[in-house]
Each structure stands twice: as structure tokens, then as C-alpha cells.
Image (spheres, rainbow, N blue to C red):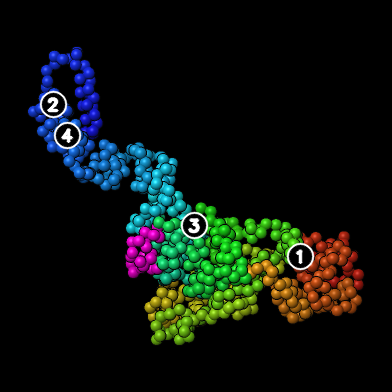
């Protein structure tokens, strides 16, 4: 305001001087009563401005010597005036951009001033902050927008520019750990996820153990459903700086962050931001279940530096060097794709092999590519790419059984030897279990009644749904666990893993604590049962040249219950009965090529002639089709009601 008044005063004096010929006879005055006449007082309307006044650093010529703020030697702080366009308190923030002005009425609405490209404030009121403002496109600070960021200001300095991204992440499964589960056939209308009700054959459930289980959460320490957890709890460095991800630990105060206190190291994390790397992703995903390779079986920390195309042809540093997000695309921070044992769906789209391998699902793709694999093209409709291309998993040893009765070193989990990880039976170079999967699953939830499978003698915690007539063939990791269940109502108990892993190491104590966490009395009777789980295999694909059809088609002996028989491909009846519907007496061919030479005869004999299923997409002659059935049935009639009804 003083500056405005001073300006008006100068204009007034100029007008006075320019009109001297008209008002030359007007006498001098002292209108502000400060003892100085208007002929020497540069502002005769302000008694604080006159030749005898003391110069202060406020942007005004207080002593009328035609020099503003002389002798100040730089900025001298006074209280910030919120509407004068001056940095009065010398903190590099002017007027409403100064935090001291947040309560000033003058700042109740945005007061446009030129954009300051480094203060985190929308100075010019155009809804673009700092380097996001086009006015800052030429500012040196925006050529490397993170170069001046300080870890001590994290994450507020990130939120200043990326508020939209923080809001997206707050709604993404990587942060919420719970969401809609349309692909689950048990309680599909219930929100499901690791944060609340997911139950498995590894650490069972998160209940009671946020400190350990939450160590891989992309938050800064609080549960996402904590009342105190706002967007500042999101730890964007966990995905956007690989070194930070590897260094992050649970700190003594319960927060998550690096243990280093060196400002140069900490600032370096914030000043070197990049898209996620395999290192960011694998820090958590490879170590799921308690250690490298334990849970998934098809990924490990070795994938970070792998150069062997047969270890993983995609994540091969010397070859394709595919990044995780090249397949798992992120849409507004929601990730594409998921495994069979994951409950909530983040982004509904699926990872498609044909995004890179275009045309391989056309029905002639393998042949067109010169691979001489017409048989592979016949499989496309019913066999997923992974079923043929993943012939082995556990290239880094993976867990195939967990026993809560013992610790990792084989000592009894009775508290005597102290806390530790439950016993893990590890194995390597395993053959996948093939199952038909229709992309839905039955994955156990906390408090559900556990149901014994009389065929396997186990209690399933994750089962892919499907059969030979419903879904495609996929490869899975199979594992079991020995864990506790209530006797009275058959509910799998969420062992208090914090107590087991970090405090007592006593299974009985950890079960009692887990029962209390679940709302049961501590002395609720329990027993140990064997559970089982299947997990989809998607990684660890070798070079295509290593794929051998014999991995499935090596044994066609009748009545042997070989791999294909167990999947539902078994002959529908005794050899004589099946073959003699067309042949009077003939030995059964023992090779896949000879067996399926029938496909080339006449209209092509349909699967239902010999098996209890059909493949209508093949356009073969169905035994239910009177228009062509006479081509083949010429000896003994056969009951095909199992495929015709």
C-alpha cells in the first residue's frame, strides 16, 4: 500500500511541476503535519515519509533522498503484508504465496502474480503448479525438475506437482490391498484382498502382523485403512527409484524408509526419479512368502541380472530385456493382469501374449512363422501359451510345503529355540501341474468353513475353476502346508505371525493369539491339517526351440492314467469298445501322430467318437451329426450320449 501511495505522490508532484506556469503563485504547505513543507517532503500526505525519516526496507523512499531502501545490505525482514507485491519477511514467498498469509482475507481467493517455478504454489492461478505451468517451460529448474528436491520435504514436494497421480495410486490395488473380486466364485460381491480377508497356505492371513506383512506395502508405514493415512502415506519412491526400493526397511518408529541418514544419499533418491524397473517390482514380488523365490516359483531376484535366455527369455538382460510394465501395463496406476490365486481385480484387462507375438493365435500363426508346428496351431483354442512354453519352474528353489510345527532349521516351534520362519521344504527344477482354468477361482477367505477334498485329502486354499469343457489348459505351481484349524467349526486359524516370527516362536502361543485376534477364546480347540494351493505360472519361459511336445504327448498307453488321461483326455471306454465301433479288431496306435491321423480321414473324425468331450471349433464330424456320422460308424454301434446330450 505504501508503494502505491508513493507512486501516486510522485505522479501528483509531476503534475504539479508540469503545471507550474498556472499555479506558480500557490504557497507551499505541510498537509501531513510532519514539519516539512511540500517543497521538500516527497509525500506530504504521509507523516512517516519526509527528509528527516529513517529509511526502512519496505520498498519506499522513506527519507526523500531519491534512493529506496539504501543501507539495508539485503532484505531486512518485517511482517509480511499480503497484498503489496513485496517479500516483506524475506522468505522468498510473496503475498498470498507466503504461508504466513493463508489466513489473511486478501488471500481468500487466488491473487495472480507471475508463476514462481520452484515454490510449489500456483502463483498465477491457472491450476498449474511450478514446472507443470507452461510459463515455466524455459526455466532452468524445469529442465531437470527433480534436481533441487530435498528428502526432508518428501512426499509433499512430489504431491505439489503430482496430485493427480497420488489420487490414482490411493485407489489402486498396490496401495489399497483390497478391492472388488468379480473373478472369485466364493463371495464375489465381497471386497477381497491381502489387507483384510485373504487366506492362503503361506503366512495364512495378515491379521495381527502389519509390521512384517506390511513391509512390502507401497505406503510409508501406516495401513491404507488407518484413519491417519492420507495421500502423504503413499511412498512413490518405492516404485520410482530402484536403489530406494532395495534400501527401504521398517524403521524403529514404525515408518518405512531407508536406514541411511546421509542427506546426500537421501536427496539422491528423490532427485533420480525413473519409471519402475524389475528391481523395484521384484524387491517385493520375488520375496513374497518370506524369501527369494519362495512363493511364486517363476520369478526370483535372479531375474534382475539374468542373461540366460533359457532361464527367462523375456527378462534376459542380454536379449529382449523386457520390463515388467511392458506386459503389465499400468492404466492410471492400476495394473493389468493377475494370477489365479489373487482375489481382487485392479484393472480388468488381461496380459496378452499376442500384444508382442501378433498373429500367433490366428490358428495358423505357428505355421506362418515358419515353425513347422501345425500341431501347435491346433491347440490354440484350448491350450494357453504358458502350458506349452513353461516346461519347468523353480529354477531358483521354491517352497513346496510349509510346516508350522517346526522352524526353518528343523527345530520344534515350541518357543525353546526362539522366533523364526516356519519350516519350508524347498525344491527346484519342477514340472508344472496342468489344469484347465476358465479365469475364475475359488480362493479361501478368513472365517470361511474349510472343506476337505476327499480325493486329495487336503483343504484347498486356492483352486482354479475349469475342466476339459470349460477353459484353457494352464501350468500351475502346486504346494501344501500343515497349519491349524478350529475343531468345532472348521475355520482355518490366522496364526499370529508376528508372535511366531518375531516374539515367541511358539506355535501354540501364536495360535492362541491368532484365535483372540479372530474373536475366539484363546483356548478354542484346534488341530493341524494339510492345505493345498495352486498358483498360475507366467514367467521363466525358455527359448521356443526348447519346447518339446513329448512333455505332454509321450505316453498313450491305455488305462495308465497318464498326464493327459488325468486331465480328461482318457478314452471314453475300453479299447475294444471304442475302436471296434469302426474297426473289427485293431491295435491301438501308441503315438500322438498315429492316433490323431483319424483327424484327416473323410470329414475328420470328431473327438467325441473316442473321448467324452467335443471340440466344435475344429469343424470335425461329431458323432451327434447325422449328416456325416455314417462316414465312420460302420461296425458296432456305440453310445455317444455323454457328448451328444
Do tag 3 and tag 1 residues touch (Cβ < 8 Å)?
no
Task: Give the residue pinned by disc 4.
Answer: 62
Task: Give the residue pinned by disc 3.
Answer: 275
Q: Where is residue 336 in the image (x, y as percent from the top left)?
A: 56, 58
Q: In this view, does 170 lie above or below 493?
A: above
- Start-end of magenta stretch: 249-270
Residue 552 visible in the current orientation: no
Residue at 39% across, 50% down: 160
Label 3: state its secondary structure.
Answer: loop
Q: How crowded is mark 1: few (under 14 residues within 10 Å), some or many (20 or more)?
A: few
Between the C-alphas of marks 3 and 2, the distance is 66 Å
Residue 422 image label: none
How many numbered dots are placed on residues in this image?
A: 4
Residue at 43% across, 57% down: 272
Between the C-alphas of marks 4 and 1, the distance is 93 Å
Q: Residues within 10 Å of mark 3 (few under 14, many from 20)?
A: few
Quarter of the image where the N terminus is located: top left
Q: In this view, does 598 lie above or below 409?
A: above
Q: In which quarter of the image is residue 328?
A: bottom right
Give the left or right position of residue 64, taking residue 553 as reference. Answer: left
Q: In this view, does 539 lie above or below 39?
A: below
Task: Give the residue pinned by disc 1.
Answer: 372
Residue at 61% across, 69% down: 309
Amino acid at each position: 500500500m505504501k508503494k502505491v501511495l508513493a507512486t501516486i505522490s510522485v505522479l501528483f508532484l509531476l503534475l504539479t511541476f508540469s503545471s507550474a506556469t498556472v499555479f506558480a503563485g500557490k504557497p507551499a504547505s505541510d498537509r501531513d503535519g510532519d514539519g516539512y513543507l511540500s517543497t521538500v517532503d516527497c509525500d506530504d500526505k504521509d507523516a512517516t515519509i519526509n527528509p528527516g525519516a529513517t529509511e526502512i526496507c519496505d520498498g519506499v523512499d522513506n527519507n526523500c533522498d531519491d534512493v529506496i531502501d539504501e543501507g539495508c545490505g539485503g532484505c531486512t525482514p518485517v511482517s509480511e503484508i499480503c497484498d503489496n507485491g513485496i517479500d516483506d519477511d524475506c522468505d522468498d514467498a510473496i503475498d498470498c504465496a507466503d504461508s504466513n498469509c493463508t489466513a489473511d482475507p486478501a488471500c481468500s481467493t487466488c491473487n495472480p502474480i507471475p508463476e514462481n517455478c520452484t515454490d510449489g504454489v500456483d502463483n498465477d492461478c491457472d491450476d498449474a503448479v511450478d514446472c507443470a505451468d507452461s510459463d515455466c517451460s524455459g526455466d532452468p529448474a524445469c529442465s531437470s525438475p527433480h534436481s533441487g528436491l530435498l528428502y526432508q520435504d518428501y512426499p509433499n514436494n512430489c504431491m505439489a506437482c503430482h496430485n493427480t497421480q497420488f489420487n490414482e495410486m490411493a485407489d489402486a490395488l498396490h496401495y489399497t490391498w483390497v478391492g472388488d473380486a468379480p473373478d472369485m466364485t466364493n463371495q464375489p460381491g465381497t471386497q477381497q484382498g491381502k489387507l483384510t480377508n485373504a487366506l492362503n497356505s503361506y503366512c495364512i492371513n495378515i491379521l495381527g502382523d502389519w509390521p512384517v506383512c506390511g513391509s512390502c506395502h507401497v505406503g510409508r508405514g501406516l495401513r491404507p485403512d488407518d484413519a491417519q493415512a492420507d495421500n502423504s502415506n503413499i511412498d512413490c519412491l518405492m516404485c520410482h527409484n530402484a536403489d530406494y526400493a532395495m534400501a527401504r526397511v521398517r524403521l524403529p518408529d514404525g515408518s518405512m524408509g531407508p536406514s541411511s541418514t546421509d542427506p546426500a544419499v537421501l536427496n539422491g533418491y528423490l532427485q533420480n526419479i525413473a519409471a519402475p524397473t524389475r528391481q523395484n517390482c521384484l524387491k517385493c514380488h520375488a520375496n513374497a512368502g518370506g524369501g527369494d523365490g519362495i512363493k511364486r516359483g517363476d520369478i526370483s531376484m535372479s531375474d534382475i541380472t539374468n542373461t540366460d535366455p533359457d532361464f527367462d527369455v523375456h527378462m534376459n538382460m542380454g536379449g529382449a530385456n523386457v520390463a515388467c510394465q511392458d506386459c503389465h501395463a499400468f492404466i492410471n496406476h492400476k495394473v493389468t493382469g493377475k494370477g489365479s490365486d489373487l482375489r481382487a481385480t485392479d484393472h480388468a484387462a488381461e496380459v496378452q501374449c499376442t500384444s508382442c507375438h501378433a498373429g500367433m493365435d490366428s490358428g495358423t500363426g505357428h505355421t506362418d512363422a515358419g515353425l513347422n508346428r501345425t500341431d501347435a496351431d491346433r491347440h490354440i483354442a484350448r491350450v494357453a501359451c504358458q502350458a506349452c512354453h513353461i516346461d519347468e519352474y523353480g529354477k531358483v528353489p521354491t517352497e513346496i510345503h510349509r510346516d508350522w510345527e517346526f522352524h526353518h532349521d528343523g527345530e520344534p516351534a515350541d518357543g525353546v529355540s526362539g522366533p523364526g520362519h516356519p519350516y519350508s521344504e524347498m525344491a527346484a527344477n519342477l514340472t508344472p501341474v496342468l489344469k484347465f482354468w476358465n479365469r475364475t477361482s475359488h480362493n479361501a477367505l478368513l472365517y470361511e468353513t474349510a472343506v476337505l477334498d476327499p480325493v486329495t485329502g487336503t483343504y484347498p486354499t486356492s483352486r482354479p475353476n475349469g475342466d476339459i469343457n470349460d477353459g484353457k489348459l494352464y501350468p500351475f505351481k502346486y504346494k501344501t502346508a500343515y497349519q491349524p484349524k478350529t475343531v468345532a467349526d472348521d475355520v482355518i486359524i490366522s496364526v499370529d505371525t508376528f508372535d511366531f516370527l518375531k516374539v515367541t516362536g511358539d506355535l501354540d502361543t501364536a495360535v492362541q493369539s491368532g484365535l483372540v485376534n479372530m474373536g475366539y477364546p484363546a483356548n478354542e480347540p484346534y488341530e493341524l491339517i494339510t492345505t493345498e494351493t495352486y498358483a498360475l505360472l507366467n514367467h521363466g519361459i525358455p527359448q521356443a526351440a526348447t519346447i518339446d511336445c513329448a512333455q505332454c504327448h509321450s505316453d498313450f498307453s491305455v488305462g495308465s492314467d497318464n498326464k493327459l488321461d488325468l486331465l480328461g483326455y482318457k478314452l471314453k471306454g475300453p479299447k475294444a469298445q471304442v475302436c471296434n465301433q469302426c474297426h473289427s479288431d485293431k491295435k491301438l496306435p501308441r503315438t500322438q501322430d498315429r492316433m490323431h491321423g483319424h483327424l484327416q480321414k473323410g470329414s475328420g473324425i470328431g473327438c467325441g467318437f473316442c473321448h467324452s468331450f467335443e471340440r466344435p471349433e475344429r469343424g470335425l464330424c461329431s458323432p451327434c451329426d447325422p449328416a456325416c456320422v455314417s462316414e465312420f460308424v460302420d461296425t458296432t454301434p456305440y453310445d455317444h450320449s455323454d457328448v451328444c446330450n
